[in-house]
Amino acid sequence: MAFLDTGRSGLVVIPGLFTFKVRSPLISEGLMALGVIMLCWVFYFFTKMIFDMIMLRDALSFVPGRLLVIGVGTLLSLSMYVVLRAFWGRSVLLLSILVVLTSTITAIPFSMFNWWMMVTFSTTDQTMLIHTMIAWSASVHLFFAQSIAIVAFLYARQLRQREADTVHAEKSLRQAELRALRYQVNPHFLFNSLNSVSALLTSRRTAEAERMIDLLADYYEQALTAPQDELVPVRQEIDAQLQYLDIERIRFPERLDVEVDLPRHLEGALLPTLMIQPLIENSIKHAVAAETGRVTIHLAVSAMGGTLIIQV
């Protein structure tokens, strides 16, 4: 945000541009989905263990079997995630049907494995069909809840991606605006400087005109070879403006003074390139050129909370 005063002063306010947080790389979607699925199965394991401790004396003997069942269930849940992910982006109706179908079908092999575990490692007089139906009716709700959790995770992931795309688009727009500002300011500055050279030559101040041309050459050599980053340190930006003011001092040798108040701890603060340039030009146009007395241009940099403030 920038406020450009048409009078003798100006203010640039840059919220939070000199405090950045570096984010760690995003974990892959597959690992995050596995984490959601494992969370559901861990909850299942602990609820079963609590039930076993209440109903059975040797509850700990069932732990290996429970863990094996959870391993198979995790693989089935991952296959359910793969199916839902493959059809992601289709209509809500199709997704709803898939949630019901995948949870219903996935519960069948899980129930059959449960029956096999009961027959192999314990005694049961229930037939496969009866036990499978009982286990299916109990587990289908578990897989249905997991499918809902997977869909919620995918929607949250999609929303996060859209937010990231929006931030990227806003950043690209800001970069385009800064480039437009650079393309606008540079020719404007060159036009004013060439007018100053012309005025000096008309006044037969050839030595000053030659010095101004040398300063212009140095300024543009530095400006054109410097990396055109979106953000630059305050110290670098102010040095560039002081170079510009050295050129203007040739036009107004007895009437232009410059003062800079830049705390050392803020020298590395970042701001958009050429952000101060319009304020400096306004000061030259509305104060120095319009007055006959001596004028001081004062640049002050300060910080308030997470905001960088530059006053001209």
Image (tube, rainbow, N blue to C red):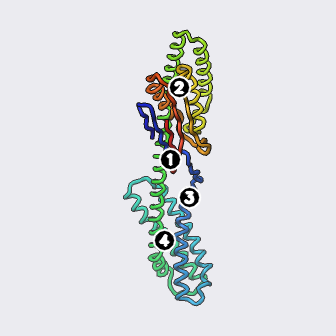
Q: Nearer the viewer, mark 2 or mark 1?
A: 2
Q: Amino acid at mark 2?
A: Leu
Residue 286, relative to residue 25: is it above or below?
above
Q: Amino acid at mark 1?
A: Thr
Q: Amino acid at mark 4?
A: Ala
- The residue carrying pointer 3 sits among few (fewer than 14), some (14 to 19) or many (20 or more) residues within 10 Å by Cα, namely few
Q: Nearer the viewer, residue 219 or 9?
A: 9
Give the image location of residue 136, x and y in percent.
47, 75
Q: How far apart are labels 4 and 2 at the CA level?
A: 84 Å
Q: Nearer the viewer, mark 2 or mark 3?
A: 2
Q: How far apart are labels 2 and 1 at the CA level?
A: 30 Å
Which residue is disc 4 drawn over? 107
- Point out the residue furthest to the bottom here: 57
- Point out the residue furthest to the front here: 293
State which quarter of the image contains the N terminus.
top left
Q: Earlier in the sequence, mark 4 or mark 2?
A: 4
Q: How far apart are labels 4 and 1 at the CA level?
A: 56 Å
Quick one: SS at disc 2?
strand
Which residue is disc 1 drawn over? 307
Q: Nearer the viewer, mark 4 or mark 2?
A: 2
Q: Nearer the viewer, mark 3 or mark 4?
A: 3
Which residue is disc 3 drawn over? 30
Q: Amino acid at mark 3?
A: Gly
Give the image location of residue 95, x and y in percent.
41, 59
Residue 106, relative to residue 24: is it above or below?
below
